[in-house]
Amino acid sequence: MNKAIIITGPSGAGKNTIADYLIGKFSFLNYSISATTRQPREGEVDKVDYYFITVPDFKTKIEKDEFIEWEMVYTDMFYGTLKSEINRIWAAGKAIVFVVDVIGAKDLKQYFGDSALSVFIKPPSLTELRQRIMKRRTEHIDALEERMRRAKVEIKMADVFDKILVNDDLDTVFGEADDLIADFFNKKIK
Ligand code: 5GP
């Protein structure tokens, strides 16, 4: 099948919720596990949620050209898509789901071209986004402000992606995501 779905948007917009929903529903989709240098949050598991690695390890992988794309998304926090993930997932006959920041998403879309559908998840408003990040309680207040600053820039880039989904009501957005998958994979799913 050799196809990919790229899910992007600001932190807290609901990218992972939507990706989890799609992967739970469609067994032909498989999550690309990114590498990161940030600390695991409570409940996150190494090699499931991310490959949690050190900054020196991350830099070695950059030197060895092991990433399709990588980004310092926040101060001293690196995130990247490993080439080995693509081989792993396509070799298993599955389609890949990437959940990445907007710059990574643009790079991936350029790399995969028409084989990938890029989807921007937009929060209903910045006020709502702030509430969601605060509710998640995973970030320090400084990190929250950095995420909000970045979100404003990211939202301005929404139009460069193939599709935009506004994540206001979850059931609605799940239905819209189903329709995108049906279209892109030419499948009947309802
Ligand atoms: P978080 O720390 O909330 O898990 O992720 C922070 C941001 O980094 C999110 O926007 C997330 O989608 C993005 N991200 C996760 N993995 C990657 C990756 O492999 N590449 C890029 N460019 N961004 C990523």
Image (spheres, rainbow, N blue to C red):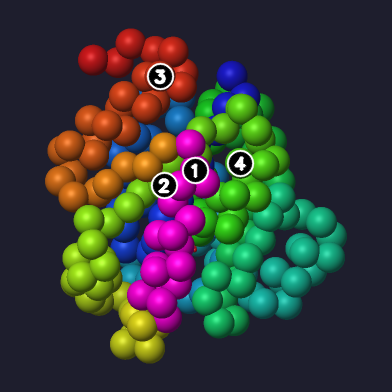
Residue 181: x and y, percent?
39, 25
Q: Is residue 188 visible?
A: yes
Provide residue 83's location: percent of width, then percent of height: 71, 46
Label 3 residue near ligand 1, CB within 8 Å: no
Where's the N terminus, which quadrant? top right
Dot 2 corresponds to which residue?
Answer: 120
In magenta, the rendered stretch is 146-162
Nearest to the observer: residue 100 or residue 183:
183
Is 106 part of what is drawn in magenta? no
Q: CA distance from mark 1 to mark 2?
A: 6 Å
Residue 163 relative to residue 179: left or right: right
Estimate how packed mark 4 is, as few (under 14), some (14 to 19) or many (20 or more) residues with alpha carbons within 10 Å: many
Label 1, secondary structure: give it: loop
Tag shown at residue 103: none
Which amino acid does the dot numbered 4 rest on?
Answer: Lys
Magenta: main secondary structure equals helix
Mark 2 sits near ligand 1, with its Cβ under 8 Å away: no
Q: Are marks 1 and 2 in contact (CB under 8 Å)?
A: yes
User: What percent of the width, then of the height, locates residue 77?
Assistant: 56, 76
Pointer 3: what residue?
Answer: 183
What's the residue at 33%, 71% (across, down)? 42
Q: Earlier in the sequence, mark 1 or mark 2?
A: 2
Compared to residue 1, the image places residue 162 above or below, namely below
Q: Residue at x 52, y 76 (%)?
A: 74
* Foreground disc of the pair 1, 3: 1
Residue type at mark 3 is Asp
Kind of residue indicated by mark 2: Phe
Residues at circles 1 and 3 in contact by the CB criterion of under 8 Å:
no
Q: Are marks 1 and 4 in contact (CB under 8 Å)?
A: yes
Residue 161: which numbered mark, if any? 1
